[in-house]
Amino acid sequence: MTRKPPTLDEIQQAIRTIPDFPKPGILFKDITPLLADARLFAGTIDFLTEPFSSGMIDAVVGIDARGFIFAAAAALKLQAGFVPVRKKGKLPYQTHEEDYALEYGTATVAMHTDALKPGSRVLLIDDLLATGGTAAAAAALVQKLGGQILEIAFLIELSALGGRQKLKQFPIRSVVTY
Ligand code: AMP
């Protein structure tokens, strides 16, 4: 069966904005309607992986938790491995950790010390770029393991929050921008 690939506009329209979730003042981007639509989900993976074909990427690294959904599907499409960057305390083996600043306080992400072979060609994926702190910490972990970041791809970029500034040394791409 061939399906008509979705447009960027259709993808953007399937993302719903929920005001004041999980805290007052946050406009939460809810991707569940997009994921539930087979054509839109597949099209989103096609956009996220657009510059690459099988054999160009060794590992797709996904960021806890919604990043996993897209990174795992992208890894299958690119015939690459999938590697999780998790919140601190979730990975069972030895880890490297990286702290990053939140609006109030700090958070920590972790990766297994043997998750990547040095020189691995990495596509790093998360669902959303806001201030860029999470992705910058994940990118630092990939680099600590000797991974080479070919691109950081996001489904959604909230451009007013300036996350790109924190990721200046990497090629960045987002599927839809607000
Ligand atoms: P940041 O580190 O500020 O770039 O935040 C990015 C991370 O926080 C991503 O992993 C997102 O899943 C999550 N996030 C931040 N802001 C939002 C938002 N408005 N809607 C949904 N998720 C968000």
Image (cartoon, helix red, strand yellow):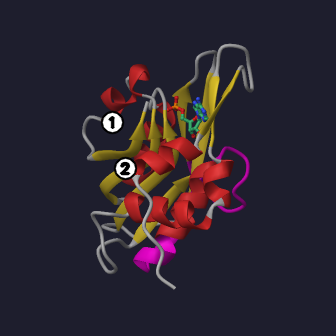
Give the amino acid type for the residue marked by disc 1 in the picture.
Leu
Q: Tell me if I can see residue 152 in this picture.
A: yes
Report helix, strand or loop for mark 2: strand
Q: In the rendered view, does 156 fall on the left or right side of 64?
A: left
Where is residue 125 drawn, in percent x and y? 46, 53
The reply to whether the magenta stretch includes residue 83 is yes
- Residue nearest the viewer, comparing 15 with 146: 15
Is the residue under label 1 in contact with that under label 2 (CB below 8 Å)? yes
Q: Residue at x 27, y 63 (%)?
A: 51
Q: Which mark is residue 167?
A: 1
Q: As displayed, is residue 90 above or below residue 23?
A: below
Q: Residues within 10 Å of mark 2 (few under 14, many from 20)?
A: many
Residue at coordinates 26% horizontally, 34% vertically from top-left?
A: 168
Q: Would you place residue 117 above or below residue 90 in this image?
A: below
Q: Is residue 5 magenta?
A: no
Specify few, some or many for label 1: CA neighbours under 10 Å numbering under 14, 14-19, or 20 or more.
some
Instruction: Point out the tag, 2 or 1, that comes first from the N-terminus.
Output: 2
Disc 2 target residue: 152
Amino acid carrying label 2: it is Ile
